[in-house]
Image (cartoon, coloured by chain):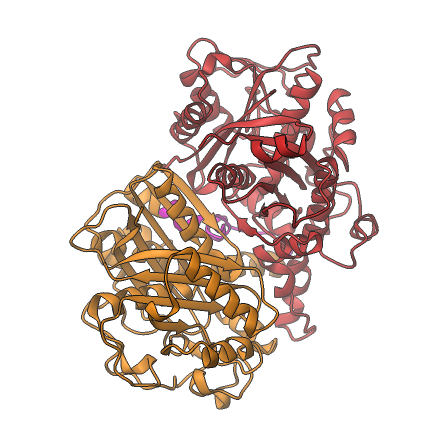
Amino acid sequence: MANKVFVTGMGIMSAIGNSVEETLYSLSNNRSGIEKIRYLETSHKDNFVVGEVKLSNKELIELAGIGTYNRTTLLGYIAVREALKMASITDMKEARTGFISSTTVAGMCHTELLYKGFFEGKNNENFMDHHLNGVSTNDIASHFGIRDYVTSISTACSSAANAMILGARLIKNNILDRVVVGGVDPLSKFTLNGFNTLMILDNEWSKPFDENRKGLNLGEGAAFLVLESEKWVKEKNKKVLAQLIGYGNANDAFHQTASSPEGHGALLAMQKAFKVAGITPDQIDYINAHGTGTPNNDASEGIAMQTIFKNHVPKFSSTKAFTGHTLAAAAAVEAVISILAIQNSMIFPCLNRKEQMKNLTITPVDTLEKNVSLDYVMSNSFGFGGNCSSLIFAKN
Amino acid sequence: MEIYINGMACISHHDTVDENYFFEDIGSVPLNNQLIATEPNYKDHIPANLIRRMSHIVKMGVSTGMMSMKSAGLEEVDAIVTGTGMGCCEDTDKFLRMLLDNDERFLTPTSFIQSTHNTVAGQIALQIKCNGYNFTYVHQNLSFEYALLDAMMLLKEQEALTVLVGAVDEITPSMFELFYRGGHIKKLENVQPIWNSNTNGYIVGEGAGFFNISRIATPSTYAKIKGVKCIQGISDANELTNEVNSFLAEIGLEKDQISLVLSGNSGDVVTDKKISEFNKTINLPIAYFKHLCGEYFTSSTFALWLAANIIKRQVVPNAIFPDQAQVLNIQNILIVNHHEDNQYSLMCISKC
């Protein structure tokens, strides 16, 4: 499987911007997108801060310009459009092209508005047409005319990492020449209340890798990458942003929602990624950690990093205090951020952090670092169900 | 490289968990518009303390996975790949109603935790302590097919020697009402044999099917998987015929080597139009399966389980075969499935 996998385009919608350019601006100016709830209709409006995309549904409909769809499809469509444009792809038939999207709640943001009324007989709108996970994937794929391999993945908060892993494997197995991969999750009452019942939300700004961290801030967004085969990139003489050089998927097999204290699944995923990449841990220059800001995740992930990197843990940070935890989209959001770090020789900081975690010996980067040459960047994502995934991007 | 089904299990409306049962007692017309799963004794497959907290779909999925492992004589696998079209409807419904009814107060986390689509894959990994590759596909009626394609790719990549792959969907009262009021499910008085139906809507069903697949055949092997193909949609029956022909060419089979076609007619006169036309013109023996399991997004697990059983037993149950002609020496079975004419899939398995 000699075919290398290159990133040639990316697109992003999140709390810190409606494009790659806006995202870079926010990241390099310490501008977090976490604010009081503005758009989501919820009785918790004043109880939590969240990372909303700063556009109403109406504004999203205008920006997308494809008609009336729910927030999920619109966010995804706009991000895919940007990614395809950056990769200069217009003709879907010139190569075998796939689309792999991921989501956890899909159209829930729309369903929860209609659900009660439907079952009380007050409305008859069939929200199933928006609700199911495959719907937004199919809608987006059909808008761009992608047909060769169109599928949806849901592995909780590691979903988009798995979309990228699948995309890379399809290219390496010579099933596709190029594939758009990523994820999308809108903010919904369902997830806000779900995470609230688990008592892992911080009412204020989250503090990843801080001793006094209380939990995560939810976010929403979409991010997609265009992956293309080495062969196709050479044939078309395309501009390359980065290489997806390594990836690993493993299961913690410890608990439905919690990570094992020693981060066993995380460790296995990182080990697999090194094996696929053919590099050693000491070659990693920066890790964009999962770093949700929950007591459990950051402790478990930190221990796993200390184990695999022994006494030489590279520079690392979590960028979730910028974007919020965008669930299924998170790994793709952070893949875009990792590639921006490589391209701009910057490490974006772990915001809001004050006190060293007592059970870790390592400390994240907490102020913006410039002029740092990054050859290899690792990005980690973990989810409910024990799903752990790790990706490695290379500069060349 | 060959890929073998070395173990499998299926929960469906009929008593498919009983190894000796093969639809001997079934007529051609179901008596209901909803085919609820016949559940096994879950205690035989899942620790009792876990069963209590599991919803219907999780119990079906996990127990079917465990039964498949048992049938393959395995206690561990290298990877777990699952699919679900609708996910955990019961828990999603429960949490959503609770939050809407109580204005987002007084909520408990259990149903939220179990509402995520990867719950079944995660629970199986927990139960058999599998730290390997773990993936969940949620692409409507192609959820199982994409899971199977991934599982086969893992074997080809030599990333795994044995993979547990399967899918599950449940029908809950809320989902039934939703699809019934939306006109998707047949009215009771319109239930007919699905291969000869002139009424709207389908008979809805639920179930789980899991398969242990490997590059190495064992004494328990059922069949070889020749190929799987997903199709994003077709414009007419002709296009379906062309897709089938190119699929057969890809997997190196001539049309007349296909002993039997299992057709995914759902009984909906409108959306079955293309597949019915295809069935008439393909000139091969056609059998049906959705009158036994009902229509659901991952009903192709039932079809694959049925096909593998037919190949191993060399018997076509009368209940699925309106022709009632004798089909002998069953070498290759082609499954053609669709859901409401949206996405189509093709699967082919062969005798070992």
Examine the image and state in which quarter residue A95 appears: top right
* Image spot of residue A376 (x, y percent): 56, 18
Q: Is residue B225 above or below residue A278?
A: below
Q: Which of the chains is orange?
A: B
* Image spot of residue A327 (x, y percent): 58, 40
What residue is at 46 percent from the left and 81 percent from the top?
B280
A341 vs A307, nearest the viewer: A341
Q: Which of the chains is red?
A: A
Is A254 situated left or right of A352 in this image? left
Is B153 situated left or right of A383 in this image? left
The quarter of the picture where the C terminus of chain A appears is top right
Asked if the stretch drawn in magenta spans residue A60, the answer is no
* Image spot of residue B60 (x, y percent): 35, 60
Residue B169 visible in the displayed image: no
Farthest-out residue, bottom: B189
Examine the image and state in which quarter residue B177 appears: bottom right
The quarter of the picture where the N terminus of chain A appears is top left
Q: Is residue B109 above or below residue B323?
A: above
* Image spot of residue A193 (x, y percent): 60, 47
Q: Is residue B305 above or below residue A55?
A: below
What residue is at 49 percent from the left and 50 percent from the top?
B116
Asked if the stretch drawn in magenta spans residue B105, the answer is yes
Residue A119 visible in the displayed image: yes
A46 vs B112, nearest the viewer: B112
Magenta part of the chain: B102-123
Is A150 situated left or right of A371 in this image? left
A97 vs B201, nearest the viewer: A97
Number of callouts: 0
